[in-house]
Image: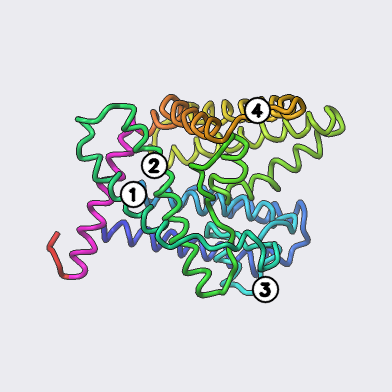
Amino acid sequence: MDGEIERLMKVWIIAMSCLCYCYYIVSRIPKGFFRLVSLLPIFYIFLILPLNLSSPNLCGTTAFFLVWLGTFKLLLFSFNQGPLALSSPNILHFISIASLPISLKQHPPNTTQNVQKPKWLLLLKVVILVMVVRAYDYKENLHPHFIIVLYCCHVYLGLELMLGLVAKPVRTVFGYEIEPQFNEPYLSTSLQDFWGRRWNLMVTRILRPTVYDPVRRMSAHYVGPIGATLAAVLTAFLVSGLVHELMYYYLTRAPPTWEVTCFFVLHGACTVAEVVVKKVILRRGWRLHRAVSGPLVLAFLAITASWLFFPQLLRNDVDIKVLRDYAILVDFVKFKLGMDPL
């Protein structure tokens, strides 16, 4: 663990040095093609940095922060768009926004989006995550369908708590008003609601200006506004699937199987079909009650995830490695606190 933390520190020192180059040099290049070219070496460095880490937790988190979010933010920055173009002229602000999963609120204060969630809800999610991790000790005695439910809960709760843990100190230190990363996805009433308004909203905010909006603008001349919207949705899901393939490579170090890409393409096609069907249904005055649509959406997500999303991770024992990481981290902390020798 000492060696892995040392490598992690080196990776992030290099990443912050790259972002200093972006702030002090690239920002002075006129926006457009030449600024984009000047960022190509940074894109390559970000691409290879996670390969220096072997821990799936540390490697996966670093890859998500730098390769996915950081690269897409810098891509927008090359055309003077996105959160980096709006950030305060301060190197610490620039680095934090570029390298962390945070998005500054664009709406004015005192709106309904600023409603604080009860603190007991966060505590409940922590307790449930601990229970999920402990339940893995009894996997041999659990039904396979229940194990899939555990995996889904683990992915959601692990991501939400990890992203919230990163965002909180940034909000405290810089005083940012930060957009939430998740919006209770288990309350989704449709695929459109799940992917567009509730699940991993940081990715949604990045894909919209980098993929969705450009595709919709370019295709509107050929297929009309409705066709352009549907094409943009499908393209955004395709790009998400391809980036997930890259994230899976960092976690497994195995050649891609394209299952996760198929997962997102399938959900993109189903979301498009859902949008079309809803237009017809709403025109006729029909509407499914949320008590029916909610369970249907969650069931569809769980079934397709067990079919296409999780298999590559499970075949490469990523779940076992993640749990082993947790145990090693706990032992490492105990050792550093003098509570228990390794």
Q: Identify which amino acid the numbered label 4 is placed on.
A: Glu
* Residue, disc 4: 274
Marked residue nearer the N-terminal end (4 or 3): 3
Marks 4/1: CA–CA distance? 32 Å
At x 64%, y 55%, the residue is: 74
* Residue, disc 1: 129
At label 4, counting other C-alpha atoms closer than 10 Å, the crowd grade (few under 14, some 14-19, many 20 or more) is: some
At x 71%, y 48%, the residue is: 209
Marks 3/2: CA–CA distance? 39 Å
Position of residue 19 in the picture relative to residue 226 (left or right):
left
At x 71%, y 25%, the residue is: 281
Residue 106 covered by magenta stretch: no
Q: Nearer the viewer, mark 3 or mark 2?
A: 2
Per the rendered image, the range of residues in magenta is 314-337
Q: Identify which amino acid the numbered label 2 is placed on.
A: Cys
Marks 1/2: CA–CA distance? 7 Å
Marked residue nearer the N-terminal end (4 or 2): 2
Marks 4/3: CA–CA distance? 43 Å
Q: Nearer the viewer, mark 4 or mark 3?
A: 4
Marks 4/2: CA–CA distance? 25 Å
x and y percent of residue 144 in the render? Answer: 30, 27
x and y percent of residue 65 in the render? Answer: 50, 54
Compared with 186, 146 (above or below) is above
Quadrant, the N terminus:
bottom left
- Of the pair 335 and 185, the residue shown nearer to us: 185
Marked residue nearer the N-terminal end (1 or 2): 1
- Of the pair 175 and 96, the residue shown nearer to us: 175
Could you tell me how many numbered marks the image carries?
A: 4
Position of residue 136 in the picture relative to residue 120 (left or right):
left
| Numbered mark located on residue 153 in the image | 2
Marked residue nearer the N-terminal end (3 or 1): 3
